[in-house]
Image (spheres, coloured by chain):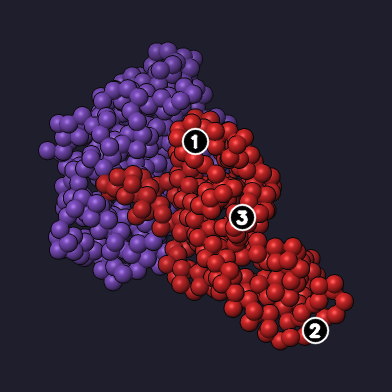
Chain colours: A purple, B red
Amino acid sequence: MSEVRLQSVRKVYPGGVEAVKGVSLEIADGQFCVLVGPSGCGKSTLLRMVAGLETISGGTCSIGDREVNEVEPADRDIAMVFQNYALYPHMSVYDNMAYGLRNRGTPKDEIDRRVREAARILEVEPFLERKPRALSGGQRQRVAMGRAIVRKPKVFLFDEPLSNLDAKLRIQMRVEIKKLQRALATTSIYVTHDQLEAMTLADQLVVMNKGQVEQAGAPITLYERPMTIFVAGFIGAPPMNLLDMPATGVPGLSLATPVAGPVTLGVRPEHLELSAEAGALAIDLTVTAVEAVGAESYIYGALGGQGPEIIVRIPGRDLPAIGTSLRAVARSENLHFFSRETGIRLN
Amino acid sequence: MEKRVVFNGRLLPYLLLAPQLLITLVFFYWPAGQAVIQSFLVQDAFGLSTEFVWFENYQVLFSKPDYYKSMLTTAIFSSLVAFFSLSIALLLAVQADRHIKFAAGYKTLLIWPYAVAPAVAGVLWLFMFQPSLGIISQAVRVAGFEWNPLLRQDHAMTLVVMSATWKQISYNFLFFLAGLQAIPKSVIEAAAIDGARPARRFWTIIFPLLSPTTFFLLVVNIVYVFFDTFGIIDAATQGGPAKGTETMVYKVYSDGRSGGDLGGSAAQSVVLMVIVIVLTAIQFRYVERKVQY
């Protein structure tokens, strides 16, 4: 069993900066956990603490049923894929993959068998004798993955492994990582700032902000029921429309059941529908810009003529002219209300 | 896209190279050429007549056993200095590369000796190890060890090796530290996760990645011990006792300047020049192949 358990883990740097402020997480055996958040939210620090590359200032981290706070990275039985791949530039691809096994005194024929198997899975067999500098970015990425899988560790750690690749390769590698993780069923922790990558890869998605966990759960749960304003704004592209509503109401916006007190109202662009009928929410907007992306289009409009910007997603390419006044409605189950003071979900 | 500025003048490249070329010509090729010419000449003791003798100076030189002895002295001296100054500097740089308190102060102090002139360094060590007055000599004498570089050749050699090493460590340290800091941190972290202990990490990852720096320093250090240690030897031992620390460069000076044998001394400097050129060529030919850039 190789579940990872974090209990109120904290990281305080000398100088008093608190990068991680008490994070508790349970990652089940074989689960793919993605940590996502803006840069500086502490997600990489958290990952590096699991790896043993950063000391843990408070709380405990355990892998399997062993607490690893004081255990050297080498003895944690983990493998890590770095953003810049961190391949050993003076070693061939074969030696890069064999290095970890050699350090552990694995027999030579066993090393050879495992390296060749990993090379076959990752399709880097033709490059085994090459040096990393003779490889393309995607090939290097595969070698870095190979180096991780040959060791058959308890946990894989990924630190933004795809951010150095171009968009097309990124999607391709994303699918491959997911397939590989499914096939190997190894507990994985994956750090990214890309919410799309996070949504597609995760069994458990953890949104972090300012050193704390905002929400953790299945990606679709976070999408459908974000528990804070931050999660609501972070998950989904284009982002959720978030409107500050004072108690007096907002011109151009009408709710079927009025809410008491100042709140933040959230509604996703795909849940707004152009319609003349009344809904739980109806907003009047003046079109300021339109974008056709193929199967769907986005309409940008100003609420009530000059209010905040609202994004509406519509199917097809039947676009209104700029300057037109439109009415968009949404159903009550698609409305999210958050407290303006605490940012916490109200409904 | 790489941006490149292309100059279309024929003159400009030469103008830009001129200062460096001029300095090299005046201070290197000219004296070197003079030495080669001089090595074919014999002058009488008063400098009144000069005779062209072809290779006689070289024949005389290679027939004297004391020349071979100074070659051996140079070999011992230079390998000891190169080995100790490189290895100690590497050790210090590895320590400084870690996150230690007062790192800046530590580094500054380590760089200081490089600013000390060779002759001054020689005098400093001479004073510390002077048999009757030197503070360290007194200390080792209390410990029951009879230290006397004025009488014992091995003690004199130890003294000059120590001073020459001490002076060169700073320079090597600077380059090693810069080399260490250029190694991506994540590569070392990856090795740590891959199960390599610090010592194994050093020999399998850090040391190979440092090899361009080590190679460069090896070349520079060989040149240093062959030529620039003259000041130290002159100040500390004057090649003594009984020529026990007379390296080839010191012999060039003592035979030419004190012995008045200008032709023989010039022949020696030509031989010295050839040796250093050959050593450097060998390093580039064979050692550089093993260097990881």
Residue B240's disc number: 3
Residue B100 placed where, x, y %?
47, 33
Amino acid at dot 1: Val
Q: Residue at x 68, y 83 (%)?
A: B56
Q: Are marks 1 and 3 on the same chain?
A: yes
Q: Residue at x 53, y 30 (%)?
A: B102
**Mark 1: few/some/many CA within 10 Å (<14, 14-19, 20+):** few
Of the 4 image quadrants, the one containing the C terminus of chain A is: top left
**Mark 3: few/some/many CA within 10 Å (<14, 14-19, 20+):** some
Q: Quadrant of residue A111?
A: bottom left
Q: Are marks 3 and 2 on the same chain?
A: yes
Residue B240 placed where, x, y %?
61, 55
For mark 1, what is the residue? B140
Q: Label 2 vs label 1: CA separation?
A: 54 Å
**Compared with residue A125, is residue A254 higher up or lower down, i.e. above or below?**
above
For mark 2, what is the residue? B51
CB under 8 Å between discs 3 and 2: no
Compare marks 3 and 2 and give the one earlier in the sequence: 2
Total tally of numbered discs in the picture: 3
Left or right: residue B290 versus residue A105 is: right
Residue lying farthest to the left in this orientation: A1
**Mark 2: few/some/many CA within 10 Å (<14, 14-19, 20+):** few
**Compared with residue B77, is residue B65 higher up or lower down, i.e. above or below?**
below
Q: Chain of mark 1?
A: B
Residue B145 placed where, x, y %?
46, 38
Q: Label 1 vs label 3: CA separation?
A: 22 Å
| Secondary structure under the numbered disc 3 in the rendered image | loop
